Amino acid sequence: MQIWFNPAAGLEAAIKSVSALEEDFRSDVRIADPRFGDFQANGILPYAKARKANPRALAVETLAKVQESGTLGGIQSEIAGPGFINFTLSAEYLFNWLVNFDSSEKLSAGMAKEGAGTVVVDFSSPNTAKEMHVGHIRSTVIGEAIARLLAQKGMKVIRDNHIGDWGTQFGMLIWAVKNEGYDLDHPGADAVQELQDLYGRGYAHYKSSDEAAALIREELVKLQDADAENMRIWTRITEISKQSFDRIYGRLGIDFDLTLGESFYRDRVERIYKELSECGLAVESDGALVVFHPEHKRFATQPFIVRKADGASNYASTDLATILYRVEELGATEIIYVVDSRQSDHFEQLFLTVEKWFAAKGYALPKLKHVSFGTVLGENGKPFKTKEGGTVKLRELLDEAVERSYAMVSEKSPDLDEAERRSIAEVVGLGSVRYADLSQNRSSDYVFSWDKMLSLEGNTAPYLLYAVARIHSIFRKANLKPGQNEAGASVFESPEELVLARKLLAFGPSMDGVFSDLRPHLLCNYLYELSGAFSSFYSANRVMVDEETVRARRLMLCSRTLAVLETGLHILGLKTLSRM
RNA sequence: GUGGCGGUAGCUCAGUUGGAUAGAGCAGCGGUCUUCUAAACCGCAGGUCGAGGGUUCGAGCCCCUCCCGCCACGCCA
């Protein structure tokens, strides 16, 4: 009996290798409706259609060859309907799969792809001198999950936080710091808020008169000319901001390999202007240097401005310089931008420009991908704000999630001591915020709801974490470690055992979709279904029964469910609990 | 105006390159704790998949037309 980690992929390969069909034939094996079996191959139908052949006959012929090849040990197969091939795994097959894949390491090995190369994941990207707010949550959470996914896939991953640490706002900020004699070496407890307020007053002054505006522009010019005092102020502002970011990243368990902000590229944009002009891509237009794409419906006339009319760079120029740096210095073969969908025009123009520019120069073109996502909305369907209409700070949002979780833990498990309830609340609260974001298709806007994300019902972090905690609890009560006392296990019998085992085997096929489109919500869907299968099993089948063979097989199911749930949740960036 | 994303149960959303009788959760109704965590489980009910055409053995998914919502479109990022 051949046991495939991913039975869908295994069956597909098995069919392909024996069929005498043309090269373009794909058997298209996927998870089937349980009514028909575990997996179904649908590929015969479109193949036969294209050739006006009889699909049913072709299916019969193909299946006969697969059966003869002897790879279907433990797998029952049959033709159904117009030419579907259905496969049903025997309980023995399911059992052997669980025996084989008995640890997170083996699951990871099973998932590993041929994924080679170096990928830079560009995510989070807050601005200095500003609080991180709810608008950063999606990029941060989705970006980290994608970074983990790619690492799982076997790629070298570089997490790069491209912070907004350069630009016109520093003129106002520096002016305000000087004007108020603000002591950057001894900032208050809420330093970033103070910087944000200073910026506000600088901005007000900038708007107040032409003389004021001129004065502020002068501070900016001095900064750009590396004036010592202004550089010192700017450097301190950056340090203070980074400390504040790091508190949040630390809490979320996110560790950037690089934090190279826009300022890092300020001396690297000249080369961009030069090369883009040389290869005829960039042209002067209304005093600015811009790139048009004549073959494109809109970008033929909608310019990509790489240098402003006043000679200053902008995010197009720094983004171009950043790509060059990542390719030349970091060896990136792929760059992924986890940025909200409102910037999709920018990235489309950026990528088009890079393709032409790199082709002209003979540079190695990396794969460029914009992983976009929608806006976080409040329950009124408008962008998420505080009751007063202000921006929701990320720090406060995380605090509230943890507080709410603490209240729930205290209500549900009052017997646990306070320290443990606090640490449980941290995991549940942060996990809930992350999971709520990840479990939704990233391309659409998402409605932020405290009640929904912290609910124990439905597709939520607490529901999944609860399943994990219950499994841990079984082992704790039995004084066993996961994986122990499985010897002599008998083959699965009860409907709940079989449903759970089948769901465990669906891990590999589910992950394929997650990898191919970088869509974490598919992993969430899978983990939710797995938790549901476990909860049903748990309710209907007592694990610690007297009969040893039954107990052993149920312990095995618990251990494997735990391994898959924890592996999956960790890929998503969630921590798990042994008690809650 | 051009383009992007969306419109699926009362609400929030899934629906894997066209597959078999469109699925969850919440809300509603009804059951289940002397037994490993009831933060759970089981059941019932709920649909002209925005509208209309088309393609074919088969369409929520592909093509065309139209309606509605959000977003982006020259010097912010």
Image (cartoon, rainbow, N blue to C red):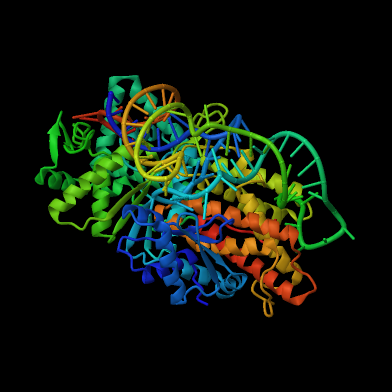
Can residue A376 be seen from the camera position used here?
yes
Q: Quadrant of residue A530?
A: bottom right
- Residue A555 drawn at (x, y percent): 69, 70
- Taking the image as shown, residue B31 lies to the left or right of residue A229, namely right
Q: Quadrant of residue A285?
A: top left
Instruction: Report the number of discs.
Output: 0
The residue at 40%/52% (across/down) is: A517
Asked whether A461 or A515 is in front, the reply is A515
The residue at 66%/44% (across/down) is: A455
- Taking the image as shown, residue B6 lies to the left or right of residue A469, namely left
- Taking the image as shown, residue A94 lies to the left or right of residue A327, namely right
- Residue A430 drawn at (x, y percent): 58, 49
- Residue A291 drawn at (x, y percent): 18, 38
The residue at 44%/70% (across/down) is: A64
Q: Residue furthest bottom?
A: A488
- Residue A198 drawn at (x, y percent): 43, 32
Residue A461, above or below A558: above
Asked whether A129 or A187 is in front, the reply is A129
Q: Residue furthest top?
A: A209
Can residue A112 be seen from the camera position used here?
no
Residue B41, above or below A375: below
Q: Where's the C terminus of chain A, which quadrant?
A: bottom right
